[in-house]
Image (spheres, helix red, strand yellow):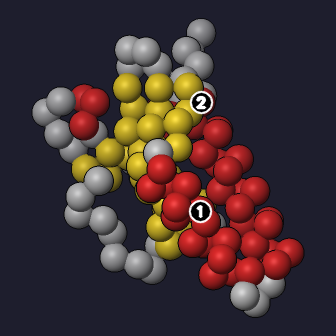
């Protein structure tokens, strides 16, 4: 049985969600709520099998490896910590934006 991971959104990821919603809300408040819900559900889905998405940045220390998860036109960047089983959502960005160099 696969372990269930605790999903934690870091403050930067919450700020990203706020900025995404604010931007979309200017044109379509209904769509903003829908995108927020999809991003939130996608992030929470990382509680099971978080290793299923590609490695964005590798490192010798497993806890420093960064994964990326595509969700529509956005990318969720996260780290996996095995003990205790935790997924840390670092940032959420639009796929057309430059990828972050530092996390």
Q: Which residue is the site of mark 2?
A: 47
Give me the residue at 80% from left, 84% from top. 28
Closest to the observer, 16 or 37: 16
Between disc 2 and disc 1, whose residue precedes?
Answer: 1
Disc 1 crowd rating (10 Å Cα; few below 14, some 14-19, many 20+) is some
Q: Is residue 26 above or below residue 47?
A: below
Residue 86 in the figure: left or right of residue 57: right
Residue 38 in the figure: left or right of residue 69: right
User: SS of the residue at dot 2?
Assistant: helix
Residue furthest left as drawn = 60
Quadrant containing the N terminus is top right
Q: Which residue is the site of mark 1?
A: 17
Query: Disc 2 vs disc 1: which is toward the camera?
Result: 1
How far is mark 2 from mark 1, CA to CA? 19 Å
Point out residue 12 in the picture as x, y percentages from the top left corner: 44, 55
Residue furthest bottom as drawn = 27
Q: Is residue 84 above or below residue 66?
A: above
Q: How many marks?
A: 2
Give me the residue at 54% from left, 24% from top. 5
Give me the residue at 33% from left, 69% from top. 99
């Amino acid at each position: 049985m696969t372990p269930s991971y605790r999903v934690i959104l870091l403050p930067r990821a919450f700020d990203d969600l706020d900025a995404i919603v604010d931007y979309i809300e200017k044109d379509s408040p209904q769509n903003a709520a829908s995108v927020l819900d999809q991003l939130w559900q996608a992030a929470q889905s990382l509680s099971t099998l978080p290793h299923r998405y590609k490695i964005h940045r590798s490192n010798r220390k497993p806890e420093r490896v960064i994964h990326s998860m595509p969700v529509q036109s956005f990318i969720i960047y996260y780290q996996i910590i095995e003990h205790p089983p935790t997924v840390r959502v670092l940032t959420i960005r639009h796929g057309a934006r430059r990828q972050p160099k530092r996390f």
